[in-house]
Amino acid sequence: MANTEPGNEEKIKNAICFFAFEHERFTGKLVSLTSLYNYLAFLDYASLEKTGRPALGLLYSMRGRHPLPVNTLAKLQGLKMDPFTFLPQAKGGYLVKARQEPDMSRFSPFERNRMKRLVETYAHRFAKANDGAGAAGVPKRRWKRPSKASATMTYSTTTS
């Protein structure tokens, strides 16, 4: 995966698997790639805010109102990984399907709790947004846009 700390790929894969698995369990719908990126960014932000370190260490850029992990989409398109798969959609975009339960031993108690709370808080909002109702309830204060519209966000740009 792009721009991560060494050895963090398995943690990122398990975070993707968790959010895909729990989002589907909670809503009955597969998670969109955009919503998955929001979950990942919100986890990194919450961890940074609480511990001073992002949980996953991904770098983000802004695409519209949403954080997008840098160089990740190109690597993920059409990629089938053990714990999850990406399903292309006719209208464009991807849905993410978990193929197995995630290995939660890679996460701290704080991270596990925060991940669960993120799904409980946003799953139905994200599912509704993916049904065409807009990005209902997605927090706007979390991300400050860097000076250039396509610039990479650093963790210093994620202040409230």
Image (cartoon, grey):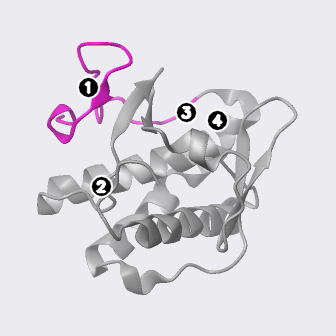
User: CB atoms at circles 4 and 2 under 8 Å apart?
Assistant: no
The magenta span reads 135-160
- Up the image or down, 49 lies above or below 135; here it is below
Q: Nearer the viewer, mark 1 or mark 3?
A: 1
Q: Residues within 10 Å of mark 1 (few under 14, many from 20)?
A: some
Name the residue carrying label 3.
136
**Which SS class for mark 1?**
loop
According to the picture, the residue beneath numbered tag 4 turns out to be: 129
Rate crowding at label 2 as few (under 14), some (14 to 19) or many (20 or more) other CA atoms within 10 Å.
many
Up/down of 134 relative to 156, above or below: above
Identify the amino acid type marked 2: Gly
- Secondary element type, mark 2: loop
For disc 1, the marked residue is 144
Q: Secondary structure at mark 3?
A: loop
Please tell me whether the stretch drawn in magenta is mainly helix, strand or loop. loop
Q: Amino acid at mark 4?
A: Ala
Question: Alpha carbon of mark 4 to alpha carbon of mark 3: how far?
Answer: 6 Å
**Residue drawn at x 29%, y 12% as measured from the top left:** 148
Give the percent coordinates (x, y) of residue 65.
45, 24
Asked which quadrant contains residue 133, the reply is: top right
